[in-house]
Image (cartoon, rainbow, N blue to C red):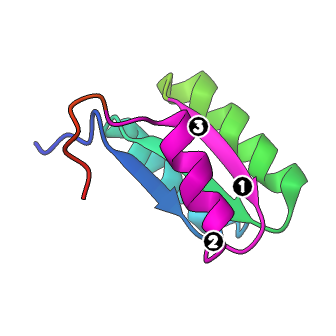
Amino acid sequence: MTTLTDRVVVLARADDPQAAVMAHSLAAQGASLVLTGVDQTRLGALAASLRDVHAVRVAVFAGDPAEEALAEMVAELFPDPAGTAP
């Protein structure tokens, strides 16, 4: 089975209820997640659920995933210690 341990996945529109299924699937494989969307309440609830159920790292970005601020946040919160990021 493929594992996503040591990987960070940015999930756009994670405030859509259907995205929760994808988020839990990714977290079950060990991925750290950055959830993006506009509904901060839903994003926060999903993040809490992912942390509780899968014990993974989760960050929330309420806004447009095309914003440069998202890339800066990911780089700050999930640094690449091996220097292998593209």
Q: In the rendered image, which quarter is residue 53 located in?
A: top right
Of the numbered discs 2 and 3, the one sitting upstream in the chain is 3
Q: Is residue 11 left or right of residue 84?
A: right
Q: CA distance from mark 2 to mark 3?
A: 15 Å
Q: Is the residue under label 1 in contact with that under label 2 (CB below 8 Å)?
A: yes
Q: Residue at x 38, y 38 (%)?
A: 28
Across and down, in percent, residue 32 comes to 44, 39
Q: Residue at x 62, y 54 (%)?
A: 35
Label 1 neighbour load within 10 Å: few <14, some 14-19, many 20+: many
- Residue mark closest to the camera, 1 vs 3: 1
Q: Which mark is residue 40?
A: none
Question: At label 1, which amino acid type do we have?
Answer: Phe
Q: Secondary structure at mark 1?
A: strand
Q: Which mark is residue 65?
A: 2
Q: Is residue 63 left or right of residue 71?
A: right
> 68 and 9: which one is in front?
68
> Mark 3 highlights which residue?
58
Q: Secondary structure at mark 3?
A: strand
Across and down, in percent, residue 37 comes to 73, 67
Q: Is residue 84 left or right of residue 14?
A: left
Q: CA distance from mark 2 to mark 1?
A: 8 Å
Across and down, in percent, residue 83 comes to 23, 39
> 35 and 73: which one is in front?
73
Across and down, in percent, residue 77 comes to 55, 35
Residue 16, magenta (yes or no): no
Q: Residue at x 62, y 68 (%)?
A: 68
> 68 and 51: which one is in front?
68
Q: Which residues are magenta?
A: 57-80
> Mark 1 highlights which residue?
61
